[in-house]
Image (cartoon, rainbow, N blue to C red):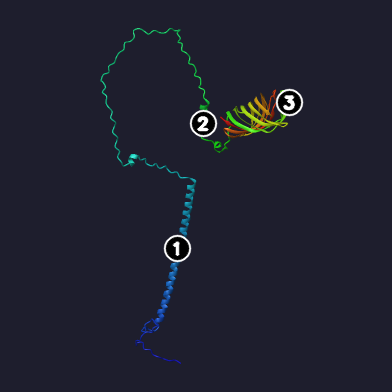
Amino acid sequence: MKIDCNVNNSISHPPHPRRAVPANLPPGAFFFFSGSMKWFCIALFTTSVFLLSNALHATDDDLFQKIAELRLKSSAHGRFVNELLVNEPKFDPIEAPIQTAIENDPIDYEPEPAPYLPTVELPSEVETQEFPSPQEPLPQPPQDFTEDVPAEEPIPPVPESPGRTASKEKAVQDEGGPTYEELYAPKVPQRRLGYFFGPFIGPVFPDDSAVRKKNGGKEGYQSDTGVTAGLRIGNDFGFTRIEGEYGFVTHNIHSSGKSGDVQLHNLQSRLILEKSLGSRADLRGGIGLGLSFIDKNLGSENYDGVGFSYDFLLGWSFRIMDNWSINMDYRHYLTAAHENYDRLQGHVVELSTSFDL
């Protein structure tokens, strides 16, 4: 079914809210306007694509050219660096200007005044004194004349005393200072040469003996253990000693109900030879000769006399300090026989000490 209607376009009415075209436009104007806008957009898009493609093409060409230039500059820089590393550059030395202390010092120095020197007036003319020449020549000595000049006697060298030499050596040591060995070596007592003295003491083990009666008979007796003590003095020559001593020996005796004692006063001289066993110890042996004053008392009778005495020594010495040592000796002694008694002999274990003077 077809419905015909007439639209009066002359009557104005408000436009539809969804339409942007005025209501008074002729029929088909909206379609014309929309078709024109479509073709305008297509033309604008085509132009934009063309311009953009041209711009991109130009941009790509510029980018490739810039990359090529960067590569050339990088190669040139590499070659320059290699040349610098191979050929070391030489620079001219820079000389700093020399400035004196006066230029740098703003203080003005005033020169010191010259010292005062007195002036001495000299005469304008110096008088010269003429000495008369000798009228006669001086006498000359004869040609065969020889002057006797006494020859100079050589001055004998002054011998240096031991004390002066020791002081010089000490001064040299003081200048050089102590050595490592002197500082850290153990202190070992040094042996001193010269005079010495010391006491001794020890037990005595005498042998049995006999006394002689006035009627020509003998009476034997048994001896008990005794003791000895004394004092000796001597001189040490290194490994040889000469000493003298006074010794007292006493012990008891008894025979067939009788008892008594024996006393000996010995004046002895002795020669001792020593052998070093180390830094402190010495082995020694010696022989002695002297006089013995003997007094024997047995019961109520007395037998005395004087005779030679002998002894043999073997012992050992140990140095405690520089001037002090101890000795342990075994000594066998015997005396000559007398008209009042038979000879005496025995054994002594002796402890002694020596102090160096």
Task: Residue at 42%, 72% (x, y): give it.
Answer: 44
Disc 2 vs disc 3: which is toward the camera? 3
Residue named by callout 2: 170
Q: In the rendered image of this protein, does residue 257 appear above or below residue 136? A: below
On the question of residue 289 being in view, the answer is no
Where residue 158 appears, x then y in whole percent?
A: 50, 22
Q: In this figure, which residue is indicated by the disc labeled 1?
A: 59
Closest to the observer, 306 or 315: 306
**Distance between the alpha carbons at the discs numbered 2 and 3:** 69 Å
Label 2 or label 3, whichever comes before in sequence order? 2
Residue 24: horizontal and vertical position, in percent?
A: 36, 84
Which type of secondary structure does the marked residue at label 2 adopt? helix
Residue that label 3 marks: 218
Quarter of image, res 211: top right
Question: Could you tell me if residue 219 is visible in this image?
Answer: yes
The answer to whether the residues at label 2 and label 3 have Cβ atoms under 8 Å apart is no
Separation of residues labelled 3 and 1 (CA atoms): 159 Å
Tell me if 357 is positioned left or right of 304 in this view. Answer: left
